[in-house]
């Protein structure tokens, strides 16, 4: 390897090329699949807090891809220094939490690359981060992706509409952009 190749590699190693955006039709009251994979109810996730719906309503997805896309139009509300989780506020006021894996905070960012920062405006399908499922599994963690609406109140109804004509192990197989959740708020 030539000296220039070594220098170039060390300069560009942390700046992975941003994946191409996903394109899908959207409705204002709907939250879409941020990653392709096998859909699971929160109760099936091996985490007491998530499975008890203490953070809110949503789904888990066992990923078949490695890129997390924006599930709606909105603004990035928070990112983590370990790049394993993102908070988002949709244009309709839904507070979303997207989390990659269980216990992955302990990986200290290894295997994760984030493409957005707090305050960024995003449209549905914008790539938010990539993750390495094999690195997650090698570190001894589950790679389930969770998508949760955290500001669900007494008057807000969330319809779980995630489904698919394709089943894998009796569970729906969803792709990026498939509708998962519809939020119904009372009219003032």
Image (spheres, rainbow, N blue to C red):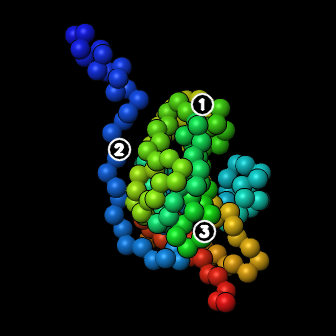
Task: Give the structural element (helix, strand or loop) at label 3.
Answer: loop
Mark found first going from the N terminus, 1 or 2: 2
Q: Which residue is mark 1?
A: 108
In the rendered image, which quarter is residue 55 located in? Answer: bottom right
Question: Looking at the image, how many numbered discs can be counted on the residues?
Answer: 3
Whether residues under marks 3 and 1 lie with C-beta atoms below 8 angstroms apart, the answer is no
Mark sitting on residue 94: 3
Residue appearing at x 49%, y 33% in the figure: 111
Q: Nearer the viewer, residue 44 or 121?
A: 121
Q: Nearer the viewer, residue 72 or 168?
A: 72
Position in image of residue 173 (x %, y %): 47, 61
Task: Give the structural element (helix, strand or loop) at label 2.
Answer: loop
Left or right: residue 179 versus residue 78 is: left
Q: Which residue is mark 2?
A: 18
Residue appearing at x 65%, y 43% in the figure: 102
Residue appearing at x 69%, y 78% in the figure: 156
Mark sitting on residue 129: none
Q: Nearer the viewer, residue 130 or 93?
A: 93
Q: Is residue 4 above or below residue 151?
A: above
Left or right: residue 48 versus residue 32 is: right
How far apart, in angstroms, are the residues tagged by discs 2 and 3?
26 Å
Residue extending farthest front: 119
């Amino acid at each position: 390897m030539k000296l220039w190749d070594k220098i170039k590699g060390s300069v560009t190693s942390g700046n992975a090329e941003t994946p191409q955006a996903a394109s899908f039709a959207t409705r204002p009251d709907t939250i879409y699949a941020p990653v392709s994979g096998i859909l699971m109810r929160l109760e099936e996730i091996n985490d007491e807090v998530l499975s008890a719906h203490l953070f809110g309503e949503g789904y888990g997805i066992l990923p078949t891809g490695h890129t997390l896309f924006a599930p709606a139009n909105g603004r990035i509300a928070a990112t983590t220094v370990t790049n394993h989780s993102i908070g988002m506020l949709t244009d309709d006021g839904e507070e979303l939490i997207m989390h990659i894996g269980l216990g992955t905070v302990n990986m200290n960012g290894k295997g994760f690359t984030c493409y957005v920062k707090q305050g960024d405006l995003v449209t549905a399908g914008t790539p938010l981060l990539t993750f390495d499922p094999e690195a997650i599994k090698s570190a001894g963690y589950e790679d389930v992706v969770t998508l949760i609406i955290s500001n669900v109140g007494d008057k807000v109804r969330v319809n779980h509409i995630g489904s698919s004509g394709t089943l894998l192990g009796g569970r729906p197989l969803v792709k990026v952009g498939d509708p998962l959740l519809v939020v119904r708020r009372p009219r003032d």
